[in-house]
Image: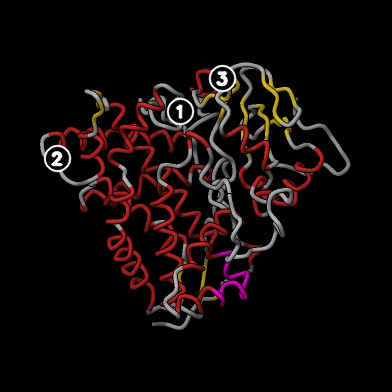
Amino acid sequence: MPDQPHAAHPQLFTWEFAADPYPAYAWLREHSPVHRTTLPSGVEAWLVTRYADARQALADSRLSKNPAHHSEQAHRTGRVGIPGERQADLMTHLLNIDPPDHTRLRRLVSKAFTPRRVAEFEPRVQQLTDRLIDSFAERGEADLIHEFAFPLPIYAICDLLGVPAEDQDDLRDWAGMMIRHTGGKRGGVGRAVKQIRGYLADLIHRKRADLGDDLISGLIRAGDHGEHLTENEAAAMAFILLFAGFETTINLVGNGLFALLRNPVQRTLLQDSLARGESGLLETGIEELLRYDGPVELATWRFATRPLTIGGVDIPMGDPVLVVLAAADRDPARFSDENTLDLARADNPHLGFGHGIHYCIGAPLARLEGQRAIGTLLTRLPDLQLAADPAELRWRGGLIMRGLRELPVSFTPR
């Protein structure tokens, strides 16, 4: 059933809620920790808000990632999942499948997307970061979303996948259409997904004839006991690495910088640490920024394959379950001073990258990009200041991700 009227019941999914959902999530954790609500799309789902319940749900095999366990109509119309992915034949990726298919695909993808490959990519991420800062450093002002947080992960993941330089602006345009869909017709997202699908199919076909050292070539080459990714699986995996790999990093960098600009004591501690050539506070700081105001507000869709109980609440078979990472990561039962930004926080098992078999395979790349982006920006533009009233900044609408539309700043021209 939809939300029931209550004198103190918070309004969910309004523009005011999007700007600061944490008081509402605190209310839910205390009064209705496993909460059934009607989403803006009209789909009814359960919100899981406490840390212990969230961790259990993320690893529960009775909660399937496959939308086939929910309404076919809801998925076909884009009310669950990524709009347009079914029509573009991009369903067979890690966010939509369960074991044993998930086990096989993750094993094959892990052969290509290795920690070593990410570590070797660090100089390129640093080069991209410096190039983007160079593009606005002389002006003394910038929008850090459009000019920095957005292009950095797009160009980085394109380079990692092996997208030729002359094609990367097209991918950037299509990616922009995908994350700006709340401002226009939903069909625009579907068209962007189809364009990306067509491009990736062509790119995979070309790379089969001339394999290189890039990630798509690695996906094609990956094999295990005679098993290989099919062309559809390779395209779907390249798509989700692109889609999940850029929007999460945009929000990690954007939300992280916004949090630091509003917490000058913590920001000064970090800058002093960087000036001394130390990396420890930056590393723990990225983890804290993921916890404090992370890029993914709700974990991606799960569906009950049979009746189960979460936090003492019975969930019927077929119902969607959405784990609220933003609420779990500020649960006072797990985190002391949960609403305080503490870059040196040592005990920080946040759920920003998920938990269990669906733990984000791109987490090392996201950490690398976050550290290089935030560390370099604060070092090169040390007097960075917010150039707008925080209350007037707009957040992108949407259910899963949490990110700013813009982040205007000023600084001494360099």
Residue 19: quarter of image = bottom right
Q: Amino acid at mark 3?
A: His
In which quadrant is the N terminus drawn? top right
Task: Name the residue nearer the viewer: 99 or 339.
Answer: 99
Query: Would you name the residue on which mark 2 appears?
Result: 211
Q: How is the image coloured?
A: secondary structure
Q: Are marks 2 and 1 in contact (CB under 8 Å)?
A: no
**Measuring 45% from the left and 53% from the top, which residue is drawn there?**
249
Which residues fall within the magenta stretch? 258-269
Q: Nearer the viewer, mark 2 or mark 3?
A: 2
**Measuring 41% from the left and 33% from the top, which residue is drawn there?**
190
Q: Nearer the viewer, mark 3 or mark 1?
A: 1
Ranked by sequence position, the earlier of labels 3 and 1 is 3
Query: Would you name the residue on which mark 1 appears?
Result: 96
Query: Would you name the residue on which mark 3 appears?
Result: 70
Q: Is residue 58 above or below residue 148?
A: above
Ranked by sequence position, the earlier of labels 2 and 3 is 3
Q: Amino acid at mark 1?
A: Asn
Q: Main secondary structure of the magenta part?
A: helix
Ranked by sequence position, the earlier of labels 2 and 1 is 1
Mark 2 and mark 3: Cα distance apart in space: 39 Å
